[in-house]
Structures are given as structure tokens and as C-alpha cells.
Image: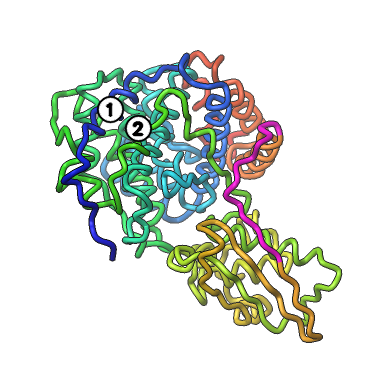
Amino acid sequence: MSQAPNLSATRTDVTRQLATYASDLSYARLSDKARTVGKHALLDWLAVTLAGGQEPLVAILRDEAATEGLGSQATLLGLGARGSVGQAALINGAAGHALDYDDVHPSVGGHPTVPVAPVALALSERDSKSGTDLLTALIAGIETEARVGCLIGDARDNGWHQTSTVGVFGGAAAAASLLGLDAEKTIQAFGIAGTQAAGVMASFGTMCKPLHAGMAAESGLRAAEWAARGFTGASDILEHERGFAATHGLRFDAEAALAGMGETFFCEDILFKHHAACYGTHSAIECAQLIRKNPAFDLDKIEKVEIRVHTRITHMCDIPAPTDGLGIKFSLRMTMALALSGEPTSALHVYSEEHAARPDLVAIRDKVTSVVDDRYGYRGAGVTVHLSDGTAIHEDFDVAVPESDLTVQEAKLTEKFLSLAEPVIGDHHAQEVLGIVLNLETLAATADLTEHLSSAQAG
């Protein structure tokens, strides 16, 4: 395990500067691209949350909340129920990460939207906020967590799940934005949020990984609400010698965290998923799909498959023999078997116990090996398929490149949204949500959006 960063010569008031930036951020200050990609991020999160809400882990959280007593302030997406804003943040947050189909961002070191959007949506609904209020809060949260990620580096090397540990600051920033907290109150919210930061990678492949996202959203929300009431935390939570960076990070790079505030928007570089598995498997899946198109490829002649990936990928998604759908999502070998077999890796049904045990897929899975090759970088991969006739087919791919054509990105995300949302809320409501989100700046009250997100099969 890496040593904690030495802060003795690098301390700065980074907590204050980030809190001031988040609390001052307004819709008018957002770039056009940030506004567009922010709407794309919200649409994508709604899609995966509606679909993820049908997973067993979400039913458990919902049933527990019902036992305690459901509130009535915010919509539990696709569940035909309402809850308190805290319940909505937790349950919608976990649902949004249940399928591991939500967006990613390298600077966050994880998934940027899922710890933030549940907070922004729940508070916007409760407090009758507009679409611009909702979008500004979402982006304030994503910008905050990305800058915290730049500050501490990629602490997944130490086993931290940064979607949760960094994401809690994003949730707090979004809540602070909607609650109208000034810089001093936002500093306190960050202090309260940071002391709750948790989530370790040992939980990957279990129900606790999506739970991390819900916990971060709920903790960030509570941090801001408590700060608004006068609750206090460490005002130097990020830079304190025993604070967040020291305990949860690999470094303390204040310059990276503070560079370009108000000019550079990290949300512009969000990466969206088009395979319903851990993002660490996506480059290898893309390689497999290219290999299938090669005229020399023959599924029945496969003798050996070699996947070359960065060290971190093997630590994150290299379950050798998964037994269920969650396990498949974190298995380079099984996702490779799916892709080489022509199974639709964007479809939810292939991540199942049945597919994990299917003999033809298992036979291919057992021919796959992963090799550490850090030349490929954190997101890239190289795949070589060796056939029995001596043919070797190789492809390289790197998914860590944001889509430059936002029209193309919007079309892809629209297709993804409709495919995931329509089975849950029906065609009519899905089309209504699509139109509202893509024109979010015209939305007068968030309730006009959430009324279409409530009941399963309402359309």
C-alpha cells in the first residue's frame, strides 16, 4: 500500500477555495458544452436508475425504508413510491449504480453523476427548483468531486472506491448549491461530508458497490442540510495533516485541484458507457467486437485469448469465474467470452446466473488470460485471439476518449435511455422525460419532470 502524502510543505486552503467556487457557481457561468454534457449526464443517470431500480438490492433498501416509514418529499424512481429526500438520495443513488452502467470520469477516479444527481433531483423536487437550478447543482457537484480527485490522485491503488469517497463531496456541493449556502456554510458541509467518506474495493461484485454510491449521495445531502442548521465540521478537511487527502489519497496536488476554476469544466469530459459492465472491461470488449469482424475469425477455432491491460484493471475487474450477473460485470474473462460469442454486451439480460454458467461461454472464458501491461494506460486494452489454424488476430482500443461530436453522443444516449426507461415507465413517460431533460433550461419546476418518473409501467 502506498504511503500517505506528505502535507507538511504543501498545505493550502484548498477546502475553502473549492467551497467558494461551488457555492458561487451559477448557470450563467457554465460553458455551453458543460450545459449540454450535464443534460446528457442527467439523462444517462435517469436511464440506468430506472432500470437499476428493478434490482433486488434496491428492493431491500426500499423495504427497509418502508419499515422505518417512507417520507413524501421526493420520488423513488420507477418504484411507484415516494420518500424523504434522504431516502431518495440513498435508494436512487444505489439504483443508479446497481447495473454498473453509469458514466465515468478519470479525474473523479470513478463514476461522477451517481453520487450527485440523486441529491440534486431530490432537493430540486422538494423545493420546487427549476431546470437551471437542477443543472447548475449537478455540475457544481461534478466539478467539485473531479477537483477533489485531482487533489488526491487515484487512490484505488489503496483500495478506496472513489465514486463514494470523492463523490460525497460532490453530493455536498450539489446540495449546498440548491440550499443557497454561502462559502462558510459550504466549507462546513465539506467538513461534515469528508468525515463520512467510505467505500472499499473489496466490495466490488457485491451489492455493497452500488450501496457506496447511495451512501455518498445521502451523506453529502445530510452534510449540507446539517451545515445549513449550524452543524460544524473540519474547515480544513481536505488539507489537514490527518484529513481526507492524507487518509484517502495518494498525493496532495493543490495546483491540479484549483487550476482553471471558472474556465475549465471537468464535466465536459464525462465518458458514457455503452456496455453494461465495469468500465475497465470496455476497451477489451471493443477489441473483441473488432476481432469478430475480421474475416479470419472463427469462434469454433479459438485456442487461446490474451487480454493485455493496466495493473489497475486486473485489480478492479478480473474475477476469473463469476457465478452471477454482478460477477460477470467485473470479469474480463467472461465479458470477453460474451463479446467474442456475439452476445449483446449492452443488454442487461446477459449479465445473469444463466449466462455465467452457460457451457459454451464458460469454455471460451477458460481460454482467456489477462496479462499486466501498463503501456496500455488505465483505460486501454490489447486483445489477441489465437486460432487452431495458427492465425493470431490482434486489436487495440482505448475507450478513454470523450465523444467530440455531441450530436452523436446525444443520439447514442437517447437510444440507451429509451431502451432502459420504456420497460419501466412506458413509452409515453419515457418520451416526455427525454424531451424535458434535453431542454432542461426551460423547465419551471422539477416536479414536472419527476411526475413522469414515478410509477413502474405507468405509460
Report which residue position mark 2 lands on: 258
Can residue 221 be spotted in the picture? yes
Q: What's drawn in magenta, residue-wise?
A: 395-407
Q: Which residue occupies the foreground of this view, 32 or 346?
A: 32
Query: Residue at point 43% right, 32% down?
Result: 75
How far across and how far down the image is residue 131, in percent? Answer: 49, 19
Q: How crowded is mark 2: few (under 14 residues within 10 Å), some or many (20 or more)?
A: some
Color encoding of the figure = rainbow
Helix, strand or loop at disc 1?
helix
Q: Which mark, residue 185? A: none
Query: Is 406 on the left-hand or right-hand side of 310?
Result: right
Task: Tell me if label 2 and label 1 are in contact, CB under 8 Å.
Answer: yes
Query: Residue at point 16% right, 32% down?
Result: 235
Q: Which residue occupies the foreground of this view, 319 or 430?
A: 319
Query: Residue at point 20% right, 51% down?
Result: 6
- Give the position of the N terminus as an image quadrant: bottom left
Magenta-drawn stretch contains 126: no
- Give the position of the C terminus as an image quadrant: top right
Query: Residue at point 29% right, 36% down?
Result: 220
Question: Which of disc 1 and disc 2 is earlier in sequence?
Answer: 1
Going by the numbered disc 2, the residue's amino acid type is: Leu
Query: Is 187 on the left-hand or right-hand side of 201?
Result: left
Going by the numbered disc 1, the residue's amino acid type is: Gln
Helix, strand or loop at disc 2?
helix
How far across and how far down the image is residue 333, in percent? Answer: 58, 72
Q: Which residue occupies the foreground of this view, 196 or 158?
A: 158
Report which residue position mark 1 lands on: 17
How far across and how far down the image is residue 126, in percent? Answer: 37, 23
